[in-house]
């Protein structure tokens, strides 16, 4: 407490009205304390009472009624009010309903703040508050609730959720970015009073004119809202909730006295003239990511409060020399401004707090003016408007795509660990490899001679912390994605030419560099600079084997977009990426039981007299193997294998897509033509080609069963009875007694994305494996088809 405020506080403490109210409050507590003292003296009696009366939620409500029904009398209420309040309210008969309402508000604040509460518990106390209000106004809720009452309560819960959400969002942001909190604790900025204003803001966002009909009931609202002091009842209720909350936290009667002092001051604040003040933004103001509102914003901080407060509005326009009261040129609405709690306007008074946000994502750099206008409940009173000017410093630094795969939104590019993912189906993380273009935005400026200077794009090993997080260190990012050209710098020589509008990096390739060229304009040859895009060759430019989890230019990496301005300030964005440059292996090894260079007669593999109704199985052997990105991690996306498929082409004829099934009759996966698990092992690893890079343990080469082939596809008689997808295309099967050449091919790919698209980085076809097949199942002489 400052020295200047002590005399004022001392005078207030000795004020006769304050002394009377304090005595009444202590008198309300006294019998309860005396009862507790008696229990402390008689442990046996305490045990019996505890056994006879199990704990109940009704206990604390009963205790609240005992304290506040005795304390909040009409005389106490009158003595609490400032002179302006007594004069405005007049005889108690006019505003007795308001006093009963306020008594419920005190109890609500006291109950909610008695301990840590979840949102669900908050809703429970909202329910008790609602019941109290309706009973106080003479319209108790029904049991069970009527349809209208159910709708009213649902409206209140939705309103409370909207009021509560900003509090949760702020808490989540604090948890995710705790870097500055230790310093705030050590410097005393955070102490035992931390969080009181945040809780008060929840109540203020909740108790608006919009929720009043559901809280009071439509009929009561219609009747009481016509009263000229209705606005004050809301302000009184908010002060009463804070008072109840303060008493719930009180650690002794000295604290109780201070709660009462704060309560009276709050009531005096209700009668301050309607006022408006903006303290921020001012000067050169940086826009900031705002997950709650979405996109980039600038916070508007100040005051909008006072007697007869109804609501306030936020507006913005370019500075063009107009007077603040000139209504021309102002922009407002949800596309350009946002209010606390997502409301369509500022529905609760704000004192030295956040009035809202200007959405700056689509605004260009330059000078802007913000106006706040506070409106009274009575139309005869004039609004109060105030303005402030600021220069918007754009801070658009983010990575939005890697190899065509977008950053998963939500959470979006401002969240450090948001992965790059497949947009369809959404949310599936994708590794990238081969030739990779990184896209995004890198632009800062322009005020106080601060403008963009250089853009760099680097990588570091592992998933590293993002900007503002503990452990973030730009020096950890040692490798350049812009090699061999280096950072993109808007500096001499020819700085002015490089700063041409077409060279702004906004939603375009970050892997780019300046090239000097000439253009013909009005018959003259003019030298210009243009940005020329390229892709990062990750398969050759990443380090081959820097540590145990990054073999063969693969593994977890973090990209760092580093933008510097002309004053040397850095602006960062990071992006976690799985790089995969390990090869995929495929080999078609043949038909089980058929020797190399041997023609295949169906008779040898089909039992004599085998009917067309049953399958004629044969195993197709081969290897389809994709090396794990991280040898120690066998889960996706380290396990990045996608699928293999098999194809058989008749010489001079059609091609048959082989169904993939482990047994016959077939059991198919989601796609009957794709095998989605590895088969066999190539008996080698990519590490063997890199000196000093230890490979994982691996087996000797062995093929596995790719699928069971139904040999009926080669018999024109039986093929006719096969259903899709087993049925071969027309002209594929052999007439009995005929032979023809067939070529088998295996295809395999993984899920790695490159600039060419999903799966194009690592895909492989085996050479055709040819064999002559004869349909000799009826033992007639064969005829070679040439």
Image: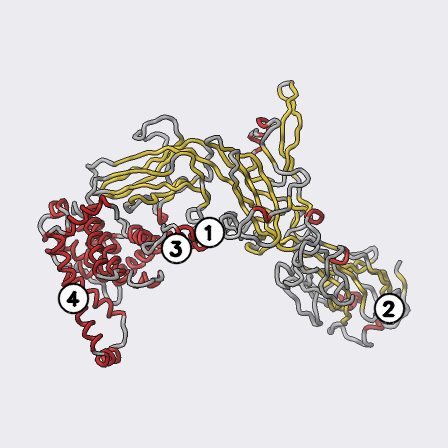
Reading the chain from its start, which is encountered first: label 3 or label 4? 4
If you read the primary sequence from the N terminus, does the residue marked by circle 2 or circle 4 appear first? Answer: 4
**Residue drawn at the location 73% of the way across and 60% of the way down:** 694
Give the CA separation, mark 4 to mark 1.
46 Å
Up-down: is 249 above or below 229?
Answer: below
Q: Is residue 474 left or right of residue 4?
A: right
Q: Position of residue 398 (x, y in %)?
A: 53, 44
- In the rendered image, is residue 146 in sight? no
Mark sitting earlier along the chain (2/1): 1
Place residue 654 in its image quadrant: bottom right
Whichever of callouts 3 and 2 sits on the residue coming sooner in the sequence is 3
Q: Position of residue 24 (x, y in %)?
A: 13, 60
The reply to whether discs 2 and 4 touch (Cβ–Cβ < 8 Å) is no
Find the residue positioned furthest to the top.
523
* Residue 595 tag number: 2
Q: Are marks 3 and 4 in contact (CB under 8 Å)?
A: no
Q: Nearer the viewer, mark 3 or mark 1?
A: 1
- Depth check, mark 2 against mark 1: the one in front is 1
- Which comes before the other along the chain, label 3 or label 1? 3
Which mark, by number, is residue 179? 1
What is the C-alpha distance between the residues marked 3 and 1? Answer: 19 Å
Q: Is residue 313 visible?
A: yes
Which residue is disc 4 drawn over?
30
How far is mark 3 from mark 4, CA to CA? 38 Å
Q: CA distance from mark 2 to mark 4?
A: 102 Å
Give the distance between the C-alpha atoms of the residues marked 3 and 2, in whole angstroms: 70 Å
User: Label 1: how many residues lie within 10 Å, few (<14), some (14-19) or many (20+)?
Assistant: some
Q: Are marks 4 and 1 in contact (CB under 8 Å)?
A: no
Q: How is the image coloured?
A: secondary structure
Contact between marks 3 and 2 (CB within 8 A): the answer is: no
Q: Pointer 3: what residue? A: 168
């Amino acid at each position: 407490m400052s020295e200047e405020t002590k005399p004022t506080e001392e005078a207030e403490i000795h004020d006769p009205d304050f002394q009377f109210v304090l005595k009444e409050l202590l008198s309300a507590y006294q019998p309860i304390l005396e009862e507790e003292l008696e229990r402390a003296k008689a442990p046996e009696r305490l045990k019996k009472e505890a056994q006879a009366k199990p704990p109940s939620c009704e206990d604390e409500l009963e205790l609240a009624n005992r304290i506040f029904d005795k304390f909040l009398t009409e005389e106490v209420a009158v003595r609490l009010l400032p002179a302006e309040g007594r004069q405005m309210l007049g005889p108690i008969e006019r505003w007795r309903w308001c006093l009963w309402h306020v008594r419920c508000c005190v109890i609500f604040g006291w109950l909610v703040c008695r301990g840590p509460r979840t949102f669900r518990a908050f809703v429970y106390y909202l329910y008790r508050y609602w019941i109290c209000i309706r009973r106080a106004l003479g319209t108790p809720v029904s049991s069970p609730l009527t349809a209208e009452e159910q709708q009213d309560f649902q409206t209140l819960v939705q309103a409370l959720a909207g009021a509560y959400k900003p509090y949760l969002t702020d808490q989540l942001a604090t948890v995710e970015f705790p870097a500055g909190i230790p310093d705030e604790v050590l410097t005393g900025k955070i102490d035992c009073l931390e969080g009181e204003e945040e809780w008060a803001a929840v109540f203020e966002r909740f108790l608006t004119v919009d929720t009043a009909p559901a809280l009071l009931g439509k009929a009561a609202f219609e009747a009481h809202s016509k009263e000229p002091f209705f606005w004050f009842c809301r302000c009184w209720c908010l002060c009463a909730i804070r008072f109840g909350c303060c008493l719930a936290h009180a650690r002794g009667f000295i604290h109780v006295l201070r709660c009462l002092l704060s309560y009276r001051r709050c009531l005096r604040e209700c009668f301050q003239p309607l006022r408006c003040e903006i303290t921020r933004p001012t000067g050169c103001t940086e826009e900031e990511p705002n997950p709650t509102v979405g996109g980039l914003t600038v916070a508007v901080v100040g005051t909008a409060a006072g007697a007869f407060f109804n609501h306030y509005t936020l507006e913005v326009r370019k500075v063009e020399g107009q007077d603040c009261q000139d209504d021309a040129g102002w922009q407002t609405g949800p596309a350009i401004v946002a209010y606390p709690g997502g409301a369509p306007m500022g529905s609760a008074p704000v004192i030295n707090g956040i009035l809202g946000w200007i959405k700056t994502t689509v605004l260009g750099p330059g000078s802007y003016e913000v106006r706040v206008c506070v409106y009274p409940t009575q139309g005869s009173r004039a609004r109060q408007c105030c303005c402030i000017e600021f220069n918007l410093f754009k801070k658009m630094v983010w990575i939005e795509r890697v190899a065509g795969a977008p950053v998963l939104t939500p959470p979006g590019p401002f969240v450090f660990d948001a992965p790059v993912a497949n947009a369809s189906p959404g949310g599936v993380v994708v590794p990238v490899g081969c030739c990779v273009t990184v896209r995004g935005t890198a632009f800062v400026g322009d005020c106080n001679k601060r403008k963009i200077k250089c853009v760099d794009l680097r990588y570091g090993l592992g998933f590293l912390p993002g900007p503002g997080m503990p452990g973030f260190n730009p020096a950890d990012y040692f490798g350049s994605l812009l090699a061999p050209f280096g950072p993109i710098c808007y500096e001499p020589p020819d700085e002015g030419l490089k700063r041409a509008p077409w060279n702004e990096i906004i939603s375009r390739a970050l892997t780019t560099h300046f090239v000097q060229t000439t253009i013909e304009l009005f018959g003259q040859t003019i030298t210009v600079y243009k940005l020329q895009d390229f892709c990062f060759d990750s398969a050759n430019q990443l380090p081959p084997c820097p540590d145990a989890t990054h073999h063969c230019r693969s593994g977890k990496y973090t990209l760092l977009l580093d933008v510097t301005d002309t004053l040397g300030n850095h602006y960062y964005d990071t992006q976690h990426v799985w790089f995969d440059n390990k090869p995929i292996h495929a080999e078609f090894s043949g038909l089980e039981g058929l020797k190399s260079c041997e023609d295949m007669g169906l008779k040898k593999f089909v039992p004599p007299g085998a009917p067309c109704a049953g399958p004629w199985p044969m195993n197709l052997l081969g290897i389809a193997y994709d090396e794990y990105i991280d040898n120690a991690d066998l889960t996706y996306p380290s396990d990045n294998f996608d699928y293999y498929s098999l194809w058989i082409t008749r010489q001079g004829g059609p091609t048959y897509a082989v169904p993939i099934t482990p047994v016959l009759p077939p059991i198919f996966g989601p796609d009957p033509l794709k095998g989605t698990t590895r088969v066999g092992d190539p008996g080698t690893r990519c590490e063997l080609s890199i000196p000093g890079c230890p490979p994982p343990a691996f087996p000797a080469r062995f093929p596995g069963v790719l699928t069971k082939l139904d040999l009926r596809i080669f018999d024109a008689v039986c093929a006719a009875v096969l259903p899709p997808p087993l049925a071969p295309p027309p002209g594929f099967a052999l007439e009995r007694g005929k032979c023809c050449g067939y070529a088998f091919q295996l295809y395999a790919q993984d899920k790695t994305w490159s600039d060419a698209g999903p799966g194009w980085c690592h895909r492989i076809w085996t050479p055709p494996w040819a064999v002559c097949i004869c349909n000799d199942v009826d033992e007639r002489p064969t005829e070679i088809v040439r």
